[in-house]
Amino acid sequence: MSVLTTVAARWRVQAHLDFMWMTKDLRFFLINVVGDVILNLAGVTAVFLLAERFDGIGLWARDQVIFMLGYAALVRGFLDVGFSYNVLHISRRIGRGQLDHLLVQPQPLWMGLLTEGFMPFSGCWSLLTGAGITAWAVVQLGAGFPVQWWLLFGANLLASCAMALAFSFLWGALAFWAPVAAEEMSSRAVGFLYQLKAFPLDGLSAVVLTGMLTVLPVGFVAWYPSRQLLGIAAPHLWHTPLAALLLALVAGIVFKKGMEHYAQTGSQRYIAWGHRG
Amino acid sequence: MHRPDRSVTSPGDIAVELREVDKTFYQRQRSERFRDVLTNLFRPTIREIRALRGVNLAIRRGEIVAYAGPNGAGKSTTVKLLSSVLAPTAGTVRCLGMDPMTERVPYVRRIGVVFGQRTELWWDQPVAASFEWKRVVWEIPRSRYDEMLAFVKDLLGIGEFFHTLARQLSLGQKMRADIALMLLHEPEILFLDEPTIGLDVLAKRNILDFINTLNRERGVTVMLTSHDMDELEQLAGRIVLIDRGRIAYDGDFVELRRRFGDRRHLTIDTGTADPPTLAGVRSTGSDGNRHRYTFDAARTPITTLLQQASAQTVIHDVETHRSRIDDVIADIYQDWNTEHG
């Protein structure tokens, strides 16, 4: 079986689990859907209202801001769909000793992490919200984007997701060395990205902006790629994928070091909370 | 029923082999005194915990081995070394001819692991969903899966709750489901860390019977840890006792009793409330005219004790029985604690 077929088979079974979970009860289903949509809309409402009130923010026209909000919601949507069950919040798994479950499965660790958090039904509401906002913005912008633009849009979107994931894994890997203290580290890191992802960062000082694109790369989650895609800045559309690649590389090295450390120390504690449930 | 190809195993039919295995952990120590705050921060005291010291252990195919020891003796560490979770600090670990760390993926396909207080079940899903998940992740061919499912359903009786949510199962049902799940890929060796912890007597017996059947009918090698020595004695032909990281005993239960004292209980009914004074025994109390003692049968023959007693009083009745293995082991642990201070 090829790697792709294997991954697809695992995604399929996870999708089945997710569908059965999502549809176990009508009330649960509705609360889940409505709750997710409201949460996602609430996450972008403040910036949207500012853009609406002032007909844009700085260099950004109102519809461009909405595009960025949609892009940010899409990033969150993809992460919700692909990396639930605390894969995104990896420090929880490490800190609670739950990594052992993955180690006794006959698959490479990366494959377990890539597939075990796949929740296309319960996680898709953020994605659909993001897709809706983005589609609406694209229509309002009125520009007939060529196929090449859509390809770059996809590549940047993927890179932004990878950036957020790598950032989470980089901080989450601290739990290998300080399992209790760092148990919630990746949640904080992801929370930080989610909170700031929808703000246009133009006008910040060079120092702060550099920080927002390096140490705390929140700028790459939506702001930077959106301004490139919309032509607000010079179109260096390979910047976000390159930055994502670099951060993923660093996160990969740190995580590998962490795994080597884990093989020596293991986990001194085990908490079942949040494991497969 | 399908039998996996087991011809590619290490020579000599050895399933598990630990050679001079050391495992050391480091624990940060912290003083509670205020004046030590800076030391705690910048030069903390690190304590070395040697969980395993020069452990040599070989388990043959088809054996059931009980792996026992007091809390913190190194049992779970050994199971983790054999489950690809931990690497040894020194020495070599081989199982089924493979290195569990460097050959993790093909290796774990051939073993089954159950940690008593953990579950592999998907918590908010019916048991059946976890089984289907396992089939896909372990890439079990459908026909073999169906056969094994029928086998475990029959022997472990999981059919009655196969479509119940895992979170709604009782402890015993959950353990049965976890063991059944572990067996779906037909592992050649099982590592069971406290598989009966928290279970009631009947559930324990069912699990033990099942392990026995599995070993007898399918030749599965089993290594299990437990604090319940009576259950280990029922199940395993061999017991390995570990104390402070070293193997303190490796042999059968009969030899264990002989080596560490064949402790027995003696109850004598006499015509008087005064207990007879017997040499080489320990009085454990009297209840009216019934007097209870414990003694080491290897050192003090029971006939000698009865002669002593009958010389002092009239004996109406006598009962004697061996100590439960639990008591024997408890005595051994106590001796170890005394030796180590």
Image (cartoon, coloured by chain):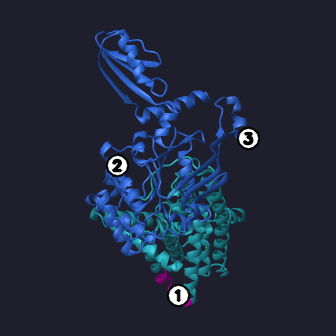
Residue for badge 3: B42
Q: How crowded is mark 3: few (under 14 residues within 10 Å), some or many (20 or more)?
A: few
Q: In this view, does A174 lie to the left or right of B161?
A: right
Drawn side of residue B281 relative to residue B14, left or right: left
- Identify the residue at horizontal 44%, vertical 59% (top origin): B220
Identify which residue, A212 or B149, lies in the foreground.
B149
For the image shown, how many numbered marks are present on the structure?
A: 3
Q: How far separated are the C-alphas under marks 1 and 2?
A: 61 Å
Q: Is residue B244 above or below residue B272?
A: below
Reading the image, the residue beneath label 1 is A143
Q: Mark 2 or 3 closer to N-term? A: 3
Residue range of the region highlighted in magenta in the rendering: A137-147
Can the viewer see residue B312?
yes
Estimate the spatial distance between the alpha carbons at disc 2 and disc 3, rounded to whole Å: 45 Å
Please identify the quarter of the rendering in which residue B33 is found: top right
Mark number for residue B171? 2
What is the letter of the cyan chain?
A
The local secondary structure at tag 2 comes to helix
Residue at the spot 60% in from the left edge and 42% down from the top edge: B245
| Whether residue A185 is visible | no
Percent coordinates x, y for residue A109 in the rendering: 56, 66
Q: Which amino acid does label 2 sit on?
A: Leu
Percent x, y for residue A5?
48, 79
Which chain letter goes with mark 3? B
Look at chain B in the picture and name its colour.
Answer: blue
